[in-house]
Image (cartoon, rainbow, N blue to C red):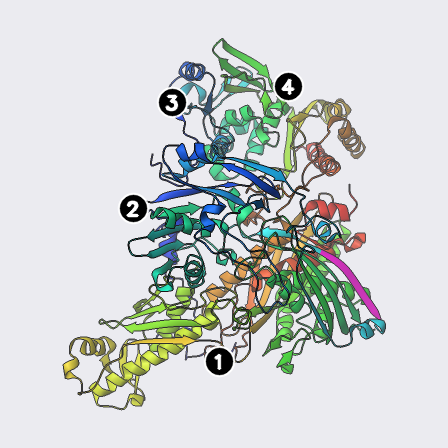
């Protein structure tokens, strides 16, 4: 690389292309954990250029075959960590068995970013304004993690801990996300309020309901851009379980939102406005869900 | 449409034709040569350490470690550059009483905004330079920060310039007619306070410069992404004491400018000094975050205004106070008070009332400088005027079109002088209003709006009339002492093969300057357009001139080209007449051929004239010296400015639950005089409108109460994007200026001038059923929801 290029402003780092998961984990450990895994680089590369991060080693995981591919495994869809955002739109298995992800994908940034950004990368970063991490909550997904001590699976509910903080330990890598297969008795809805198409939303929401006729037997509703982590609104869910989605019930659910969300002070969007927008969005999505979504 | 300048049915009639820009393909193919792309032998790279404080004393700077870093060639502080660069002051004489502190490339002892460059590092790569920045230690001592307009005006509040009496840069007052009397006797008065957020240009290519000082020749060459190479040649020569003839500024392809790249920036001046200190080429390209904190910003006005009307809706008087905060310095050399000056002079411009009073107060604060950016002052003047007119219409129960039709200066009443002193040669408000009404399908839109409202869908319709300043004479800058030319120059040569080379001082920033110049030359000479090569932007090659800003390229540069071409044609015909033993008046040029003027029969190819003149001058009559190169300068005379006018309309929908605004359609009827290339004029209007819509809905530089820019990235600072932009419908009225043969006025800022006013009126129209109003731009969802009391 020609270091004379003005565009290159990151601090110098070493680069290692891993062929296997073990190689990647091993390289991380040998760098004394002063390393970052890189796949799509949609968040990491800007952070490097801004010198917000300056690891000694970048470990390229994009050539690890095991991290690729979408396939059925029993009652679940296994979505490899390297699955790109654009594949969420094009992959028939996603459209059939994880339609909520398929519906959320067009809202993830712009085509150029979707062509590079990966599902696993998005979940690992856990940006509270991102669509996919929040959807793993609505889907009751499980995140498969590889570390030097072996593999483990963590429920999405237990994965997101705080702002950019997850259940991932230093040196661990997401290998896949397991999503329960979408069923005929389920309905879903997704939308977000973003000032421009592809922007971080002011507030966004996805939901997955299991119904008997018009009655909701179970529902999981997850918001993003409302706090430090993607947020499930369990109080709202409780008002809906066992009920039909009429206007009164939707209003009750909107009323319960205040108990579930505590949006932080924002530079441009005050907490009360974000809560208001979340209520409006919740009402609209439940309305759609009631119409069969 | 006005009568064409030349008959459109003959060959080479290019004036008035929609033709693609010849350079568009080259740029699309990635063959552009931007300063960002250039790499010179032995070139080094500069990076700047920036102040984290909005206002602080520099106690000490430690650079030892940075100097010792491998690959670092120079670490320079303010003191180092002050030894070779004289300070500059951003004031002009015709703004009486204005003040601004002297500026240097890098500060000596105090920083005055967060993001100000403090120390420069020059190294073998940008990355090494950035590494070295991390090794520099600057010890600051915080000083009280002046952030907003109120804080700046507080008696005994903190001062941007310690030692000065207050934070005032400039005050100006206009008073004409009998304003108090008119308000005292008015049947109706409407009043509002408006605020306009800061925004910035966000060019696709950031600022980029390579300074290359050759000590052996005492010669400075600067490759500079700028609109105004001649202005910078003069400034680099003066401030670094290098003879003007030994300073060459080359403005290559440039990735957007919009007025932002014609100001002096501290980093750019520093880069020139760094190259002089090192005797090597030094390159600096601002990154996006640096652009946000160091490019000029614009707007940042708070305007209180009222209008008096009689019982029938006739406007009697306006009274205006404009407060504007410009940062810590007035920008050099064009100052930061031109925007405010244009705001108070353009308010009310479309209308015929005569009683007008305005006060302008320009205020310092600890933020980056504001200065001229596309449509300087126009969007503010337009929004204030047009919103007040709509408020008056609603108070009187008049339709927005009706109140404007009643009050605009009639098309047959020109020339006119505005109460603010602007002289209008000929405008066409009535014709434009009428055309817009038809084009919008206004009555049907209103009917649809009423229907949808019953279903809880809130659509708004807004219109906004405007006047734009173009083709400025020396009254703009020259009279104030600025060495900024209002004339342009062209050098035209007939080449030995019978083609034409045109060196001209107006510059190209992607808007098609070179295209229209080649159209004018080819049209006036009688040559195919592809036989005309236009060369711009190199002070060593092109004659000195104003270049391209304030919508002067077509009007002034175009007229320069026209007159130069006519002079060259006379010379060619003189030689042709000698060869053909005819009178020159009996000959003409058509499609590259000398023809018989009356029969149009071809006599001789123009290439043959060139061949004989260049290679067989021995065959010409003795004493003949063929002059196939002409140089010509043109400075506007007559009216000090060529004002243009037009009107915009828009239709939009407000989601009253979310505060989101969806733009549905935008319309403009515009009168820029002679249209040289309709396709390029329409592109200018569309681009200008989109920039205005960005300001209306999205763009704002937001600051914390400690003076930190909160949204200095493209994730947080929202520029208009295609998905949110409406279709834009365009129509023209043509009222050529009689001041020139060409009759062209400017068009680049017309779109931006009224787009935000139009949206402001439409949003207010949409939320009128809720008794809610908005008077602040940008119109964000938060402002809409607040107005609707939704949270």
Read off the residue under disc 3: A16
Whole-angstrom CA distance, mark 2 to mark 1, is: 54 Å
The answer to whether mark 3 and mark 2 are in CB contact below 8 A is: no
In percent of width and height, residue A63 lies at: 39, 23
Residue at the spot 19% in from the left edge and 75% down from the top edge: B614
* Quadrant location, the C terminus of chain B: top right
Task: For mark 1, give the secondary structure.
Answer: loop
Read off the residue under disc 4: A157
Residue at the spot 61% in from the left edge and 32% down from the top edge: A129
The answer to whether mark 1 and mark 4 are in CB contact below 8 A is: no
Q: Chain of mark 4?
A: A
* In this rendering, the label closer to the viewer, 2 or 1: 2
Q: If you read the primary sequence from the N terminus, does the residue marked by circle 3 or circle 4 appear first? A: 3
Residue at the spot 36% in from the left edge and 61% down from the top edge: B538
- Name the side, left or right, on which B403 lies relative to A30: right
Whole-angstrom CA distance, mark 3 to mark 2, is: 33 Å
- Whether residue A292 is in magenta: the answer is no
Task: For mark 3, give the secondary structure.
Answer: strand
In percent of width and height, residue B738 lies at: 51, 81
Q: Quadrant of residue B350?
A: bottom right
User: Both on one chain, marks 3 and 4?
Assistant: yes
Whole-angstrom CA distance, mark 3 to mark 4, is: 33 Å
Residue B170 versus residue B288: which sits nearer the camera? B170
Task: For mark 4, give the secondary structure.
Answer: helix
User: Both on one chain, marks 2 and 1?
Assistant: yes
Whole-angstrom CA distance, mark 1 to mark 4, is: 74 Å
Q: Residues within 10 Å of mark 2 (few under 14, many from 20)?
A: few
Where does the magenta region start and end? Answer: B187-194
Whole-angstrom CA distance, mark 4 to mark 2, is: 58 Å
Read off the residue under disc 1: B3
């Amino acid at each position: 690389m020609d270091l004379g290029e003005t565009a290159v402003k990151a601090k110098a780092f070493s680069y290692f292309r891993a062929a296997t998961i073990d190689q990647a984990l091993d390289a991380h450990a040998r760098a004394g954990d002063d390393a970052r895994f890189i796949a799509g680089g949609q968040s990491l590369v800007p952070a490097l250029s801004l010198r917000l991060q300056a690891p000694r080693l970048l470990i390229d995981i994009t050539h690890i075959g095991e991290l690729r591919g979408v396939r059925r495994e029993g009652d679940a869809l296994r979505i490899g960590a390297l699955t790109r955002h654009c594949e969420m739109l094009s992959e028939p298995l996603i459209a059939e068995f994880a339609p909520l992800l398929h519906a959320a994908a067009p809202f993830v940034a712009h085509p150029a970013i979707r062509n590079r950004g990966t599902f696993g990368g998005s979940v690992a970063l856990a940006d509270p304004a991102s669509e996919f991490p929040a959807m793993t909550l609505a889907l009751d997904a499980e995140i498969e993690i590889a570390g030097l001590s072996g593999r483990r699976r963590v429920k999405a509910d237990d994965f997101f801990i705080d702002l950019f903080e997850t259940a991932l330990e230093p040196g661990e890598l997401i290998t896949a996300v397991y999503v329960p297969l979408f069923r005929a008795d389920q309905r879903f809805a997704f939308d977000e309020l973003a000032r421009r198409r592809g922007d971080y939303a002011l507030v966004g929401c996805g939901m997955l309901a299991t119904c008997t006729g018009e009655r909701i037997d179970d529902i999981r509703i997850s918001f993003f851009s409302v706090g430090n982590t993607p947020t499930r609104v369990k109080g709202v869910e409780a008002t809906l379980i066992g009920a039909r989605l009429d206007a009164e019930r939707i209003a009750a659910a909107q009323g319960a939102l205040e108990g579930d969300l505590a949006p932080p002070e924002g530079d441009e969007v005050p907490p009360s406005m974000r809560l208001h927008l979340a209520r409006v969005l919740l009402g609209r999505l439940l309305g759609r869900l009631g119409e069969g979504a | 449409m006005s009568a064409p300048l030349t008959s459109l049915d003959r060959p080479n009639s290019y004036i008035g034709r929609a033709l693609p820009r010849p350079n568009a393909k080259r740029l699309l193919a990635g063959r552009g040569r931007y300063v960002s792309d250039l790499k010179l032998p032995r070139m080094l790279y500069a990076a700047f350490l920036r102040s984290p404080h909005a206002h602080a004393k520099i106690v000490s700077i430690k650079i030892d470690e940075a100097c010792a870093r491998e690959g670092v060639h120079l670490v320079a502080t303010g003191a180092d550059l002050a030894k070779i660069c004289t300070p500059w002051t951003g004031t002009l004489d015709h703004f009486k009483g204005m003040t601004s502190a002297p500026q240097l490339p890098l500060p000596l002892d105090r920083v005055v905004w967060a993001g100000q460059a403090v120390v420069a590092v020059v190294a073998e790569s940008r990355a090494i330079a950035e590494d070295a920045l991390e090794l520099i230690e600057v010890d600051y001592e915080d000083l009280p920060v002046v952030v907003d307009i109120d804080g700046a005006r507080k008696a005994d509040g903190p001062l941007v310039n310690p030692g000065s009496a207050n934070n005032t840069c400039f005050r100006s007052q206009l008073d004409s007619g009998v304003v108090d009397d008119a308000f005292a006797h008015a049947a109706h008065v409407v009043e509002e306070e408006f605020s306009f957020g800061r925004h910035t240009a966000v060019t696709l290519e950031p600022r980029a410069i390579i300074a290359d000082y050759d000590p052996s020749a005492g010669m400075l060459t600067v490759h500079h992404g700028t609109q105004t190479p001649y202005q910078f040649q003069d400034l680099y020569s003066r401030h670094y004491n290098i003879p003007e003839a030994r300073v060459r500024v080359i403005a290559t392809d440039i990735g957007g400018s919009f007025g932002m790249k014609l100001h002096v920036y501290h980093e750019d001046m520093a880069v020139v000094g760094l190259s002089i200190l090192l005797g090597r080429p030094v390159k600096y390209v601002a990154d996006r975050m640096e652009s946000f904190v160091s490019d000029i910003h614009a707007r940042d006005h708070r305007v209180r205004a009222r209008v008096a009307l009689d019982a029938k809706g006739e406007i009697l008087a306006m009274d205006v106070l404009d407060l504007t905060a410009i940062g810590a310095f007035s920008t050099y050399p064009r100052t930061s008070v031109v925007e405010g000056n244009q705001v108070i002079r353009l308010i009310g411009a479309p209308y015929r009332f005569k009683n007008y009073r305005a006060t302008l107060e320009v205020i310092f604060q600890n933020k980056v400088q504001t200065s001229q950016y596309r449509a300087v002052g126009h969007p503010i003047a337009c929004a204030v005027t047009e919103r007040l007119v709509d408020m008056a219409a609603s108070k009187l129960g008049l339709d927005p079109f009706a109140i404007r039709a009643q009050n605009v200066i009639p098309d047959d009443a020109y020339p006119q002088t505005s109460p603010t002193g602007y002289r209008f040669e000929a405008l066409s408000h009535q014709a434009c209003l009428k055309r817009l009404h038809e084009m919008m399908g206004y009555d049907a839109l209103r009917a649809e709006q009423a229907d949808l409202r019953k279903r809880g869908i809130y659509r708004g319709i807004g219109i906004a009339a405007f006047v734009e300043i173009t083709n400025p004479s020396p009254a703009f800058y020259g009279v104030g002492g600025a060495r900024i030319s209002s004339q342009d120059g062209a050098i035209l040569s007939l080449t030995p093969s019978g083609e034409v080379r045109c060196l001209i001082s107006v510059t190209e920033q992607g808007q098609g300057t070179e295209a229209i110049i080649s159209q004018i030359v080819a049209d006036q000479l009688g040559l195919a357009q592809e036989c005309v090569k236009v060369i711009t932007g190199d002070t060593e090659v092109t004659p000195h001139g104003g270049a391209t800003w304030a919508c002067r390229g077509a009007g002034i540069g175009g007229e320069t080209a026209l007159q130069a071409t006519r002079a060259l044609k006379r010379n060619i015909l003189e030689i042709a007449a000698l060869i053909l033993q005819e009178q020159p008046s009996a000959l003409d040029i058509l499609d590259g051929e000398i023809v018989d003027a009356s029969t149009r029969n071809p006599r001789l190819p123009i290439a043959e004239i060139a061949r004989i003149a260049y290679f067989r001058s021995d065959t010409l009559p003795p004493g003949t010296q063929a002059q196939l190169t002409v140089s010509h300068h043109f400075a506007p005379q007559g009216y000090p400015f060529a004002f243009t006018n037009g009107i915009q309309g828009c239709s939009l929908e407000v989601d009253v639950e979310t505060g989101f605004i969806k733009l549905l359609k935008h319309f403009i009827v515009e009168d820029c005089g002679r249209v040289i290339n309709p396709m390029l004029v329409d592109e200018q209007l569309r681009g200008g409108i989109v920039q205005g819509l960005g300001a209306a809905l999205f763009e704002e530089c937001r600051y914390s109460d400690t003076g930190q820019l909160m949204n200095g990235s493209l994730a947080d600072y929202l520029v208009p994007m295609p998905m949110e932009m409406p279709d834009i419908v365009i129509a023209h009225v043509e009222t050529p200026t009689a001041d020139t043969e060409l009759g062209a006025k400017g068009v680049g800022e017309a779109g931006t001038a009224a787009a935000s006013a139009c949206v402001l009126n439409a949003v207010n129209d949409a939320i009128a059923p809720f008794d809610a109003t908005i008077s602040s731009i940008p119109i964000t969802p938060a402002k809409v929801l607040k107005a609707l009391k939704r949270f």
